[in-house]
Structures are given as structure tokens and as C-alpha cells.
Amino acid sequence: MSGKRIVLTSDRTMMSSYHGGVLLGFAATMPRSVMPDRIFHWLFCPPVPADPDGSARFAPCGMRKVEASLLEAGFSEEEVMVAHPDHLDRAIGPDTEVVGITHDDPLGKIALREIEEIINRGIPHNRYRFLELINHPRIRRYRPRIVVGGNGAWELKGEEVGVDHIFLGEGENEFPRICRAISSGEELPRVIQGSAVSGGDIPVNRGASIAGLVEIGRGCWRGCAFCSPTMRSLRHRPLERILQDARLNLDAGSRDVLLHSEDVFTYGSQGLRPAPDKVLKLFEEVKRLKPATIDVSHLSLATVHQNMDLLRQVSRVVGIGSDQQYMSAWIGIETGSCRILEMHMPRKALPKTTANWPEMVRDCYALFDEQRWLPVASLVLGLPGEEEEDVASTIDLVESLKGYTGLILPLFFSPMSETRLGAVRGFGRQQALPEHWELVGLCMEYNLRHLKTLHRLYRERMTASPAVHLALKVVNLAADRVLHRYLNRMKQGQPPN
Ligand code: SF4
């Protein structure tokens, strides 16, 4: 087996459809010691199917874009392979020059510190699986150059784990050139920065993506200080190319479509003034393809608030309550403090002012509830300058959302060196105020309260067997018991242990 010249892959925590429930993928941040690997993969991350040649039938959308860009740049299908992590022996050989790995959280840094500091049970599955992948016997034997890209590639800066190049930003323009440079033995820097691709040049995929994810555009004009600068320019793809990707996924056996961009309701606009007609046309055309469900990956609360009728119209087009039970979206609340918002996210509430933020969040949650949307929200704890009054404002905001179904994920602030915040210190147990623990406890209580409803609603998307559903119920019950011990302490402002 001589191997493919360029092999694109990732580890088992990324190469899974998570039984159709992408939120289950978060379980990869769980410490490995909590349950045996076999049960973990059966329950949360079953592998995507593989074709007889060892290629993966479904892959993360970002990896599909890189594959398409290589083929458009002149590499042949014989040279490039999106390989299944369980079959790398059929992909990597003496002819392999580059192994390109796409990862969202290779070292488990996104949620590791919270989880570690709360339950203190060792390294998470995603870190373990990533390190296992880059130490695969075929990689050790043939020594292709390892290039890691994707949302989590920044975690590898300053880490000596055996990765040759860290690729930050968008890959379509530079990755083919990097592969040619490696081929011709050119010296390359360890950290490589990709450049923004225009909306019309984002390629059409050549293979199906996990979760039926279809990219509609990139970037966000709001410019929050802790967000990656590669996100700054807002671009959208032409509708026909979006539909081509959606058709390809459905033809490959996906049931659902997940429309992805940093703020789906800005589709077709320059940002501040949404273009409702283009958004509705997008949903109407996708609906015509007859997927079982349609979801959106991310929405800005300010964009939702600006035109509440747009969300109602989208709900009607999608058929919530008739064709599908609910719709979900990731949203960023980040803080309940207007002062912190003004300091680090001054454009977050536009066209309203930062002083309106808590009220805007509550209005949007009331709308989500009315229209049967499930928000999965993030909070950022420990942003520079955050004082106890700021955390208290976030606590008040979360308290006021208690009655609405959803999930709220409190994330410890982790600085990325390329952001405007630069090399400030991250946030962890040592810096946590009693109010921070109270807030984490409150979010845990909120999530546990709504987990049963979420699991029931999520069944619509899930392809898992009844045995897996039953086991997940048992895991929910066990998590409820264990986590209540920690959350009762935290709600009193004490560290979890
Ligand atoms: S609103 Fe979200 S995507 Fe946009 S800049 Fe802020 S954090 Fe980044």
C-alpha cells in the first residue's frame, strides 16, 4: 500500500455523526476516566460509516471544503483522500506527503479547565484521541508532514506534541499551495495563516458533511475583542452553491440540513441591515429539497431582536409544529453586564445600545419560547476587568431565563493570542470569585432541569437505537445525581471541591 499523497482526516471524536444529535459531541470534553472507551463511543461518538477503500462517507464540513479546494487547485482524486480514522492503514503509506487534520478542540482546552476544575478526573477523550491519531503507527513509520487546521488549531501554539504546522484561519486559498511547497521540500513556518476567501469562491463540497451541515457564509462584523480576527469580514455564498451542498448531503443519506454561518439571519446582507427577503428565500429553497428537519447553527440575538417577525416567518416556512417539532440555534449571551459588553463587545447589541442587552436577551428568549426554538447559549466567565457586580448581573439575567427551555454553557475565558485582547491571562479556579461558582452552579441547575425535555425533543433528529436512548436516559440520571452534589456547593458560592 503506497498511500495517498494528501490524507485529510481527524480523530474519532470529530469523525462521528453523534447519532444525529450534534450536542452529544460535547461529551468528548468529558474525562476519559469517567466511562470505558467502548461505551463512550457507542453512546456518544459512534464512527461515521467508511467506504470499502477506507474513506469516510461523512466528514466535517471544513475538511470537505479543503478537499474541494485541493481538487479545484489541480490535485487529482487519486492523490487526495478524506480518510476514516479507523482505516488509516489504507490511506497512509510511503507516498503520503501531508496528513491534514481538522479539529475543533484537539487538546481539550475549550471546556477542559471547567470540567477538570469541577470534577478533577484527568484528560478528556478529545485530547487523548487527537494524540493517539498523530502517533498512529503509519504516521510514525512514514513521517508525512502533519498540518493541523480548524477552529481549535490555535490550541497547539506553544505545545510540542509532534505537529509540524499549525494552520490558522481559512484553508481554501493557501492549503493547496502549502501541500505543493511540502512536496518540493520548501521550508515553511510552523504557524501558517490562511486568508479570507470571498463568498463566491467558497467551493462546493465533493463529499457529504457531518450533521447535514451546509455553509451559507463566513464572518461577523460585530468584532468582539475575544473573537478570532479571521472572522471579521462578512461574506455569503450564492444560493445555488448552498443548495448544491445541501443536495449532495441529502443524496448521500443525510436526513437533516443544518445551515451554518456566524449569524444565519444576516444572509445576503452587509450585516447591520438584514435582508429578510433573501433569508426567507434561502429557507424556502432548502425546504423544497424536503429534508426531515432544518436547523441553524448560530444566530446573533441582536439580529433576531431587530426583526422578530423574520424568525416567525422562518418558523412558518420550516413548518415548526407540523413538519418538525422545534428548531435550535447557538447564541452568544456572553454576559449580563452592560459594562462588560461595552468594554469588550461594543457592537454586540447594535442597532440597539449595550444598555439594552439584558432586556434584549429576555425578549429573544420569550420569542424562542413562543416559536418553539431551543437556544443553546454561551456565557464567557472571567473576561478582563470583570468584577463581582458584573457576575451578579449575569446571575440575575440567567435567573430570569429559568422558565425557558434551552442550555446555557458557562465557558472560562481562554485568550487566543491573535485576538485584540492579545496575551492577557486566561481565567481559572484561582481567579474565580464566589459569584462565578454561583453562576456555574446556576447554569448546571438550569441545564439539568431542561435535559429531559431536550432529550425528548432531540429524538426527532437522532438515529440512535432504543438501547442507546435508554442508556442515555440512565447517564442523564447518573449525571443529575453526581452534578447536584457539586452544584449545591457552587450555588452557595463555594468551589465544587
Ligand atoms: S458576535 Fe460572535 S461571531 Fe460575532 S464577533 Fe462577537 S463573538 Fe465573534
Image (cartoon, rainbow, N blue to C red):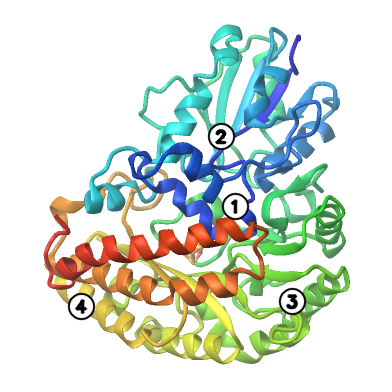
The answer to whether residue 379 is above or below residue 101 is below
Which residue matches tag 1? 18
Q: At label 3, which amino acid type do we have? A: Val
**Which is more foreground, mark 4 or mark 2?**
2
Which residue matches tag 3? 279
Of label 1 and label 3, which has the lower sequence position? 1
Q: At label 2, which amino acid type do we have? A: Asp
SS state under label 1: helix
Separation (CA) of disc 4 from disc 3: 37 Å
**Which is more foreground, mark 1 or mark 3?**
1
Figure quadrant of the N terminus: top right
**Which is more foreground, mark 4 or mark 1?**
1
**In-front residue for pair 450/107:** 450
The answer to whether residue 19 is above or below residue 170 is below
Answer with the quarter of the image where residue 3 lies: top right
Can you see residue 481?
yes
Answer with the quarter of the image where residue 212 lies: bottom right
**Residue lying at 62% horizontally and 41% vertically, measured from the top left:** 15
Of label 4 and label 1, which has the lower sequence position? 1
Q: Label 1 crowding class (10 Å Cα cut-off): few <14, some 14-19, many 20+?
A: many
SS state under label 2: loop
Residue 328 image position (x, y, % from top left) = 59, 73
Figure quadrant of the C terminus: bottom left
**Which is more foreground, mark 1 or mark 2?**
1
Left or right, 330 with respect to 20, comes to left
